[in-house]
């Protein structure tokens, strides 16, 4: 029973939707901003679940794989399709509601907000090749090294840029120091990119067979850890320390925010031997939840 519940939560991508909301909460706390509306978080959750499920929701007869996640989707195809229709309906309904409610405010957005709004979804659609083939057949997921940076960029955009943009639209709130926002964005981009590279490591053999030059395929597992993951983590950590210095974070806040980087490094070294798919979905994705909780706790406890 427990295994069925765990598989349902993680294979159906509900946990990933929760991560998007949690990381958005972290952004609000670290930038000292109010939270977005419940409708926005519901839209973010629904869009995240729909997006991640889209890549796996294929007809049962078209699947030949021993991957536990792929097999789960084959066994629950009818449920997954119903879930997808539900979440896309929620996205469309809330999207129209925001459009009708705040259309004039959206038109008044400065150009750099529109750049963020359009660039991130475009990268997300190109990552899975979701645009019609008649328009463009490019698939960023097949670009080897570049793919991890793309998905890291999309995640950072969704949990950093989108919440700030929606606060501007709904409440007219702007960031007093946009440079600090960029440092926070860079920290999250590097953290999520490392997370994505670690996921690539589980597909090492399959990617090697189709000659997809990911970092793991190009360098091997151990060298990927030392020569790719560690430097990227240091860049993300440096970005955070710069952000923390400007915000005058307390030592407690700094230490709590550094903890996820340490955990990520420890988990990275654990990937020298093969792990099951749920290890990646629970432990590696779980590091994003740890990051959000530490970021929020750092602000809360650092103020006392």
Image (cartoon, rainbow, N blue to C red):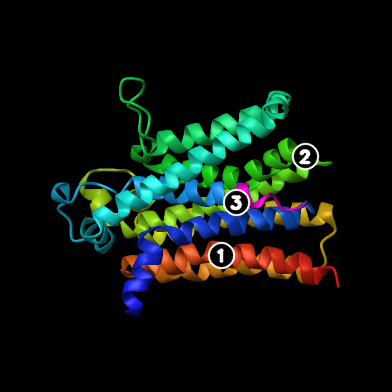
Distance of label 3 from label 1 (alpha carbons): 16 Å
Q: Is residue 130 left or right of residue 179?
A: left
In front: mark 2 or mark 3? 3
Check disc 3 and report the residue beneath it. Answer: 41
Distance of label 2 from label 3 (alpha carbons): 23 Å
Helix or strand or loop: what does disc 1 sit on?
A: helix
- How many neighbours does mark 1 have within 10 angstroms: few (below 14), some (14-19), or many (20 or more)? many
Check disc 2 and report the residue beneath it. Answer: 178
Q: Residue at x 73, y 39 (%)?
A: 170
Helix or strand or loop: what does disc 2 sit on?
A: helix
Give, as a single range, the part of the protein colored magenta. Answer: 34-39
- How many neighbours does mark 2 have within 10 angstroms: few (below 14), some (14-19), or many (20 or more)? few
Q: Residue furthest bottom?
A: 1
Residue 81 part of the magenta-drawn span: no
The circle drawn on residue 289 is 1
Which quarter of the figure is the C terminus placed in? bottom right
Mark 3 or mark 1, which has the lower sequence index? 3
Residue 107: x and y in percent read 69, 23
Residue 239: x and y in percent read 69, 51
Taking depth in this image into account, of 13 and 191 the one nearest to the observer is: 13
């Amino acid at each position: 029973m427990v295994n069925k519940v765990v598989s349902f939560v993680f294979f159906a991508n509900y946990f990933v939707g929760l991560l998007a909301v949690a990381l958005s909460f972290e952004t609000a706390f670290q930038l000292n901003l109010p939270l977005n509306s419940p409708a926005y978080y519901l839209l973010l959750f629904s869009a995240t679940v729909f997006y991640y499920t889209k890549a796996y929701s294929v007809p049962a007869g078209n699947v030949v794989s021993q991957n536990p996640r792929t097999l789960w989707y084959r066994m629950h195809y009818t449920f997954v399709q119903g879930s997808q229709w539900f979440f896309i309906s929620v996205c469309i309904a809330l999207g129209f509601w925001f459009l009708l409610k705040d259309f004039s405010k959206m038109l008044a957005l400065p150009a750099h907000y529109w750049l963020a709004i359009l660039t991130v979804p475009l990268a997300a659609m190109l990552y899975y090749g979701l645009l019609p083939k008649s328009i463009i057949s490019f698939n960023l997921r097949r670009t080897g090294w570049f793919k991890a940076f793309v998905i890291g960029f999309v995640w950072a955009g969704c949990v950093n840029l989108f919440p700030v943009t929606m606060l501007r639209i709904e409440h007219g709130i702007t960031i007093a120091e946009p440079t600090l926002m960029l440092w926070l964005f860079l920290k999250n981009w590097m953290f999520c990119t490392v997370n994505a590279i670690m996921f690539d490591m589980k597909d090492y053999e399959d990617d090697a067979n189709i000659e997809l030059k990911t970092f793991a395929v190009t360098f091997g597992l151990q060298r990927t850890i030392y020569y790719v993951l560690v430097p990227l983590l240091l860049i993300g950590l440096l970005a955070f320390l710069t952000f923390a210095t400007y915000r005058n974070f307390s030592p407690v806040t700094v230490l709590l925010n550094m903890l996820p980087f340490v955990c990520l490094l420890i988990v990275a070294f654990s990937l020298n031997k093969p792990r099951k798919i749920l290890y990646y979905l629970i432990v590696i994705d779980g590091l994003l939840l740890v990051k959000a909780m530490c970021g929020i706790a750092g602000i809360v406890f650092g103020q006392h």
